[in-house]
Image (tube, rainbow, N blue to C red):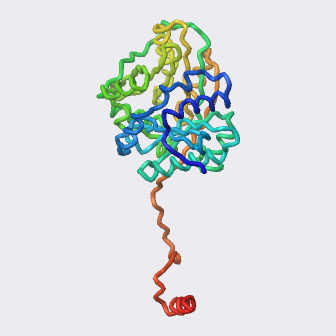
Amino acid sequence: MTKIISLRHSDLKKVRKMIEYVSPGISPGKISEDAYVSFPFNMIHGFLPLKLKFLQECYVAVEGDNLLGLISLAPDGKQKTRWKINRLILNPNAYDTGKQLIDYVVNKYGGAGVETFITTIDENYTEALALFKNVCSFRNNSKISIWENTSDKVSSDISVPLRQAESSDAEKLYELDREALSPRFRASLLKTVEDFRFGLQNKLLNRLKGHLIKSFVLDNPEKNSIESFLSIMTADNESFWVDITLSLAYQEYYKDILNFAINNVFSTNNNAKLYVGVRDFQQTAEKAREMLSQRDFIQRGTFELLVKDYWKPAEYATEKKVPIMIFPDLTSPACNIIRFIKEF
């Protein structure tokens, strides 16, 4: 009989063997113990109420001594109403186990108050996409493409005065994020003001996760607003992830902000690998692809962003319909006759 339980430290070796079997030659860094919250921290974190959780939580499907699969998810934002499924690892021919794991976390966390679940899946992983979309009722939301820098050129022609982001920028960054999102994606993907407070707590959490993040903004003094947000993240000072958010009015500055990011990364490591994400749910995505192509970037992959809403606003119909009752009190004369017949 298959059981779903929290990940135990003793399961990590089995997880590693399972990944090595499914994907031979995978980097050891992808399956290191540091990637999982293990005992006793997972136990302590598991007892926290939903709003206080901040680390990923992992569950495994086991049958006797056999480990059939693993799923993990983490809060996507400080409001904790949206969670992201960031890992799903299954043994071969464990399709049903995948459904069990996904349904388990969706129902467990949805019942605790999570409103939306998201996940990103490589578009080449057709079986995983079919599992989430056709079996577990996730819907296509958007796409994220990954672009890699293939040139070691830096630029001295940067005319935008970027500065480091501060905690006091939170309100303006929220407004920028809201404007950058295409309207039809705001219900599922909009962040909160708290997500942009880059204070001491945020820095400690990033350090705990092993992330080094630099954040920069482009001010518009005339409107007292922020028109661009640049984030540069690395975990090893070798591979760097760059994310750029721009308002529609300032999308022509994408090239300058990209050059600023390239210079910043190469000043840290001349041999760095630099990747940029383009999010189709942002209104400036087409401009970003155009500028990356001109700057010797090559598209390396595309991920589908899938969403499932656990809680939806109630919809009330205006027309009158017959009410549905299950196991009524049997007080009507007709029901009393039926009950009398059943008793004899």
Q: Residue 244, position in %: x, y?
A: 48, 25
Residue 18: image quadrant is top right
Which of 4/246 is in front?
4
Residue in the picture at 61% in, 48% down: 99
Vertical arrangement, residue 214 with respect to residue 280, above or below? above
Q: Left or right: where does residue 328 sit relative to residue 172?
A: right
Which of 246/342 is in front?
342
Residue in the picture at 48% in, 10% down: 263
Task: Tell me, yes or no, if residue 132 can be seen here.
Answer: no
Which of 111/122 is in front?
111
Q: Residue furthest front?
A: 65
Q: How many labels sit on residues?
A: 0
Residue in the picture at 47% in, 25% down: 34
Q: Residue 333, position in %: x, y?
A: 50, 93
In the picture, the quarter occupied by the C terminus is bottom right
Q: Residue 241, position in %: x, y?
A: 51, 21
Residue 92: image quadrant is top right
Vertical arrangement, residue 230 with respect to residue 335, above or below? above
Task: Tell me, yes or no, if residue 226 can be seen here.
Answer: yes
Residue in the picture at 59% in, 20% down: 292
Vertical arrangement, residue 163 with respect to residue 323, above or below? above
Q: Residue 309, position in %: x, y?
A: 51, 50
